[in-house]
Amino acid sequence: MIYTVECSFADPHSDAEWNDFYSLEKLPALISVNGFHTSQRFKALSRGCPVYLAIHSIDGLDILTGEEYRQKGGGNFARWQQHITDWHRNLYDGIERAPAIGEGEYLALSARGPESLIRLGLTPQAMHAVAMEKFPEYRWLAKVEGTKIADIAHLPEDLHVYEPMTRQLTSDAGATVEKAR
């Protein structure tokens, strides 16, 4: 399943510190939770969506309600909470593992259907929201080679494009490794 966390951050003075915390502390803590398989953070290049997106591949909802998640990964935002805006969490079925997005690649998401992704020559994967906010109910995602998106400003409104902020972290037999870009 795919667990997404989206938000914007409203304090430009502590934005760099927030991103260091999330990328260098939060993601490694999450990937160490049994049942988390991949984790990666992104920054939106498109408008009309939260600025930050984290995508995790997990075994299921019970991982997010378990004690290990609460101790290692859930919460820990008290210092930043007042600046976090447009925060959304969803659990999607339909894709077992999130694709690793490397340097020179983008992640594209659409909540209106796969057509915009198909018109770009991409192969979208469908996801259906099954827990948390359950909105948007359906999403389609695709990995995009950088050369396929020449002008992000002229993409369809329903298409949100993200660049990777981190490499995809993976958990293999309890050992955390970074997947090379």
Image (cartoon, rainbow, N blue to C red):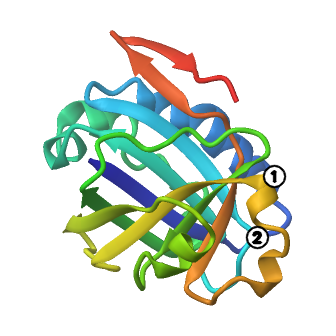
Q: Is residue 129 visible?
A: yes
Image-based side of 51 in relation to 31, left or right: right
Image-based side of 85 in relation to 64, left or right: right
The residues tagged by marks 1 and 2 sit, at their Cα atoms, a distance apart of 10 Å
Q: Quadrant of the C terminus?
A: top right
Which residue is label 2 attached to? Answer: 11
In the rendered image, residue 37, in percent from the top left (x then y), is placed at: 37, 30
Question: On screen, 117 above or below 107?
Answer: below
In the rendered image, residue 67, in percent from the top left (x then y), is placed at: 20, 35
60 or 160: which is nearer to us?
160
Which residue corresponds to the image point at 24% horizontal and 67% vertical from the top-left?
128
Which residue corresponds to the image point at 71% horizontal and 82% vertical from the top-left?
155
In the image, which disc is placed on residue 39?
none
Q: Quadrant of residue 58?
A: top left
Q: Are marks 1 and 2 in contact (CB under 8 Å)?
A: no
Which residue is label 1 attached to? Answer: 16
Task: Give the amino acid type for the residue marked by disc 1 in the picture.
Answer: Ala
Task: Give the amino acid type for the residue marked by disc 2 in the picture.
Answer: Asp
